[in-house]
Amino acid sequence: MMTLIKNINLLLAVLFVFANSIAAQNFTVKGDVVNAETNQAVEFANIGIEDTYLGTASDIDGKFEIQLSHALEDKIVRISAVGYRAKSFFVKDWADISYVKIQLVPIKYGLSEIDIKAKSKVGYGIVKAASNLIAENYMVKSHTYKCYINTAGTNSSSVSQVFLLTDKTGYKTRSFTDAFQNRNYKIIENSSDKEPQSFSQGLTMIDQVINSDIARCAGNVLSVESVNDFEIEVLGAEVINQDSVWVISYDCKKPNMQNCGDPDAYYYSGKLWITIKDNVVLKNTSVLKRKHNFVHGNDFSVPADVPAKEVTYQVETTYRKDGGNYVLDAVDYRYSVNSSVQKLFLKVVDVLPFDGSIQGRQYFNNEKYNTSFWQNFKKPVKQ
């Protein structure tokens, strides 16, 4: 009898340990399914594990809860809803989180039979979705861009530098403050063997160029809070590097610091190339005109007593995929004052781990010329 009782207790202990082991393998994820354009709830969306019978649906408020297992980590969670493009994740991507926000992009149908007013409405939706999905599509981890930059002007010789641009927060937060506080840069190579003869000759102008990364910085057409300040229209579709993209024009009705990043601008317009599949901005071209020329660039307001000189800025910014996320690829930046033209071309030559030793920004270039480096370095050219 005592032996039987011991065996029963042993069996219960084994079952208890087994049950706890199974429970430890399970985890629960709660979330919201929303429209990527409007941030409104998507009701009755299906959330299911492919090749299984496991799944759930969002309620009338777009909320859902699903229990998953670590044994399913290589399986795919698929979220779908009528009228939206489906989205997929690996179960392992949710293993260490308790909440997830799923942004579904509404399906855009053919535009050939849509009138101008409807095309404009579609354009606003595409731009808003692209902005809301930046943190999902672009690199949000801390990183360092190794950059090449060339400066050439009507009245100056061509000078090149290689510099390291660190970003502590990546594309997670788009604000003027975050972009300034969490990005630093340091010049590591200089192609000129001549010492700057004046303050203006030594200015790097790197700030102007890196602020043209519209996916990273606020004060442009991707600022959702200002998107209604623009006239937006879908011009059509084309293919860039095997990606089908929407081509969208924008024209700022009344430029200001909030919507174009320049307190003295009176004209700001451009075009966006946004992927149809994932709403990623692959390219942006823009033209900005301001009333005054100022030595520190167009993100400074000019005193009233400074003589007016119209300045025109023309910028092309492109992005590329690095691993699973998009990063800055190149910036072609030029500005003209009267008959004088200054051209700057930046190319990201590598994406490196974050370098926390780089503090502050190097506004003045006085680095020494390294002959051997430039003899072996292949300078990038604009494609």
Image (tube, rainbow, N blue to C red):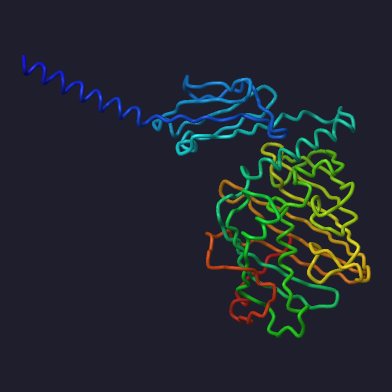
**332 is higher (above) or lower (below) than 279:** below
Q: Nearer the viewer, residue 201 or 300?
A: 300
- Residue occupying image coordinates x 84% and y 61%: 313
- Residue occupying image coordinates x 67% and y 38%: 278
Q: Quadrant of residue 345?
A: bottom right
Quadrant (top left/top right/bottom left/bottom right) for the N terminus:
top left
Q: Position of residue 297 (x, y in %)?
A: 80, 66
Q: Position of residue 129 (x, y in %)?
A: 71, 38
**203 is higher (above) or lower (below) than 67:** below
Q: Nearer the viewer, residue 330 or 215?
A: 215
- Residue occupying image coordinates x 87% and y 48%: 252
The total number of labels drawn is: 0
- Residue occupying image coordinates x 65% and y 31%: 104
Quadrant (top left/top right/bottom left/bottom right) for the C terminus:
bottom right
Q: Nearer the viewer, residue 18 or 155?
A: 18
Q: Which residue occupies the extreme front position in the image?
A: 304
Q: Position of residue 249 (x, y in %)?
A: 84, 44
Q: Quadrant of residue 280?
A: top right
- Position of 117 with respect to 273 (left or right) is right
Q: Which residue occupies the extreme top position in the image?
A: 1
- Position of 117 with respect to 326 (left or right) is right
- Position of 59 with respect to 218 (left or right) is left
Q: Position of residue 376 (x, y in %)?
A: 60, 74
**243 is higher (above) or lower (below) than 203:** above
